[in-house]
Image: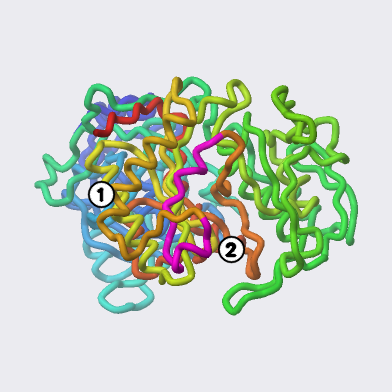
């Protein structure tokens, strides 16, 4: 395992070097309560693990292994909260400070940070932790950097072969009502978030290897694309999510009023108007719901929008009535709204575009019922240089959903073979896209030509699924692999934008292996469900924003 690097780790190491709790009875100083000596020299760790579902793994060192529970909602200092804790298999000690990525496809595939660590001891009265675990009742004091005070772990029953326990914080000096682990998202080992570790992991965990060799350094072969300077500024703290107080204030508005989010006030109107009628599996969505969604998704969505002109699809009368495209900055846009002037606009062409660069800008657009957002492929600093190459799998009426996924998997194979980084994205309707970051120096002719060459190779392997005819009527209902979107002012729907159809489905970025998920549908997620997915799985495309990637020559 690697050296621990952070100051807390050094403190801990010094502490451990000086004391042996199994034998000492010396007073422990201010940080440690005057209590009976613990039964063992015992560390604990909590890892925040984003696998298929987000959970926190609480592990106590007992008799040379890490006795472990998976806590879906995470541990809390709130004594009124009772948290489910699923007892899982013991982990090797080598896993104690693992932080990195478990490859997808392996058990627990996802990203892991060391969310908290420290020491633990049995509460007074206990003397044998292994026996307490076996008996299903364990009371421990935790001395971590985040978790403090007395916790009870009590077995409540079984589900399948899993033991279900409850984790409860006792009423003591460390207890704190309403304490939320998600408010403290950074690693105590590295200071990084799960997103940051996922984007640049130092370690992979190979569960097929012996524990002592399972943590392997991530190889970064020369030539692997680095982030461009503009993309490095798009870290996850640049835009805050709305506070609970801000969300309460939105709910408290009547049908109209002024709402302040992240310090900027936006005038809102017709808040209870239904914009999206319900569909079978999703409720109706009002304008207030869309505004709340835009504010909540802003930290995730703005990295795709900032510094780019945006084309808008507006549905002011609801999505069951015809909407319209609007490229122009709305006439009533507030002064703080960033804007960009297209100096090359021909007479009659749109000259002024909105540039969305803060949560309030997304809120303003929701109030305009501009519910589908299409950022340009290029940035305002040079609109002739795309930063993304797009593959757009546009199904025809004769294609079934599986055809689209088949095509997307063929692209996966092709890009993998070429060593090109990209990620798939469901459109929220029927299609799938693949977004490929490209570095500076490419023009649209380059990206369009490259995508066309790859697409013709993919299409040639499944000629019965694909048509190259331009006109929809000529395609016999087959899919189009549309490389022509790689052009200035031709755009695809932004990640996490809603689509103007009932139920408010959302375009969502995916990991490649999700294309093999039998549950996957391009309209699987809605604005009511996608935030849970983001909390659990993050945004797989985000680490690729602004990669300085070169497209390999194709012959
Ligand atoms: Mn886990």
Q: Which residue is drawn at 82% across and 65% down?
A: 272
Comparing 528 with 555, the one in front is 555
Q: Does the magenta stretch include residue 530?
A: no
The answer to whether residue 67 of the structure is visible from this angle is: no
Q: Which residue is drawn at 64% across and 50% down?
A: 296
Q: The N terminus appears in which quarter of the rendering?
A: top left
Q: Which residue is drawn at 32% across and 25% down?
A: 5
**Of discs 2 and 1, which sits in the foreground?**
1
User: How far apart are labels 2 and 1 at the CA level?
Assistant: 28 Å
With 219 as the anchor, is 79 left or right in this view?
right
* Image quadrant assignment for residue 256: bottom right
Dot 2 or dot 1, earlier in sequence = 1
* Residue 51 circle label: none
Badge 1: few (under 14), some or many (20 or more) residues near its Cα, within 10 Å?
A: few
Q: Which residue, given by chain and number where applicable, does mark 2 sit on?
A: 505
Q: How many marks?
A: 2
The residue range painted magenta reads: 471-487
Q: Which residue, given by chain and number where applicable, does mark 1 sit on?
A: 413
Comparing 116 with 391, the one in front is 391
241 relative to 78, above or below: above
147 relative to 383, above or below: below
């Amino acid at each position: 395992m690697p050296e621990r690097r952070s100051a807390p780790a050094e403190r801990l190491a010094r502490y451990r070097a000086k004391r042996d709790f199994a034998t000492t009875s010396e007073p422990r100083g201010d940080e440690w309560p005057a209590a009976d000596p613990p039964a063992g020299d015992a560390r604990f760790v909590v890892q925040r693990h984003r696998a298929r579902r987000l959970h926190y793994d609480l592990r106590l060192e007992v008799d040379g292994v890490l006795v472990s529970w998976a806590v879906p909602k995470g541990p809390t200092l709130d004594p009124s909260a009772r948290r489910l804790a699923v007892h899982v298999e013991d982990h090797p000690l080598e896993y104690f400070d693992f932080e990195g990525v478990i490859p997808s496809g392996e058990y627990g595939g996802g990203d892991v940070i060391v969310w908290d660590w420290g020491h633990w001891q049995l509460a007074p009265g206990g003397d044998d932790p292994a026996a307490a675990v076996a008996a299903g009742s364990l009371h421990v004091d935790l001395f971590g950097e985040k978790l403090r005070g007395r916790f009870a772990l009590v077995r409540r029953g079984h589900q399948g072969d899993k033991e279900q326990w409850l984790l409860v914080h006792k009423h003591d000096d460390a207890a704190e009502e309403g304490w939320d682990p998600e408010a403290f998202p950074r690693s105590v080992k590295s200071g990084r978030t799960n997103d940051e570790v996922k984007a640049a992991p130092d370690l992979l965990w190979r569960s097929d290897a012996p524990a002592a060799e399972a943590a392997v350094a991530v190889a970064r072969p020369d030539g692997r694309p680095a982030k461009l300077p503009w993309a490095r500024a798009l870290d996850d703290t640049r835009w805050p999510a709305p506070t609970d107080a801000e969300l309460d204030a939105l709910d408290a508005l009547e049908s109209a009023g002024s709402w302040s989010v992240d310090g900027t006030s936006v005038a809102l109107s017709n808040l209870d108007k239904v914009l999206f009628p319900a569909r079978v599996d999703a409720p109706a969505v009002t304008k207030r719901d869309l505004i709340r969604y835009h504010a909540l998704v802003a930290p995730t969505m703005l990295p795709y929008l900032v510094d780019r002109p945006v084309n808008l699809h507006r549905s002011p009368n609801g999505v069951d009535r015809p909407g319209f495209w609007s490229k122009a900055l709305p006439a009533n846009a507030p002064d703080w709204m960033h804007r960009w002037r297209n100096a090359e606009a021909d007479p009659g062409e749109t000259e002024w575009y909105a540039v969305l660069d803060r949560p309030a800008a997304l809120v303003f657009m929701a109030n305009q019922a501009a519910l589908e957002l299409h950022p340009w492929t290029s940035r305002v600093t040079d609109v002739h240089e795309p930063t993304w190459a797009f593959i757009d799998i546009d199904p025809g009426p004769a294609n079934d959903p599986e055809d689209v996924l088949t095509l997307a998997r063929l692209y996966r194979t092709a890009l993998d073979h070429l060593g090109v980084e990209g990620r798939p994205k469901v459109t929220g309707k029927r299609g799938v896209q693949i977004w490929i970051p490209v570095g500076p120096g490419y023009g649209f002719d380059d990206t369009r030509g490259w995508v066309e060459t790859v697409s013709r190779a993919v299409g040639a392997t499944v000629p019965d699924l694909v048509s190259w005819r331009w006109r929809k009527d000529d395609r016999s209902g087959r899919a189009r692999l549309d490389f022509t979107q790689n052009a200035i002012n031709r755009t695809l729907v932004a990640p996490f934008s809603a689509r103007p159809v009932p139920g408010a489905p959302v375009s969502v970025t995916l990991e490649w292996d999700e294309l093999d998920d039998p549950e996957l549908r391009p309209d699987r997620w809605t604005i009511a469900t996608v935030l849970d997915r983001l909390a659990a799985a993050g945004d797989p495309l985000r680490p690729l924003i602004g990669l300085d990637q070169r497209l390999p020559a194709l012959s």
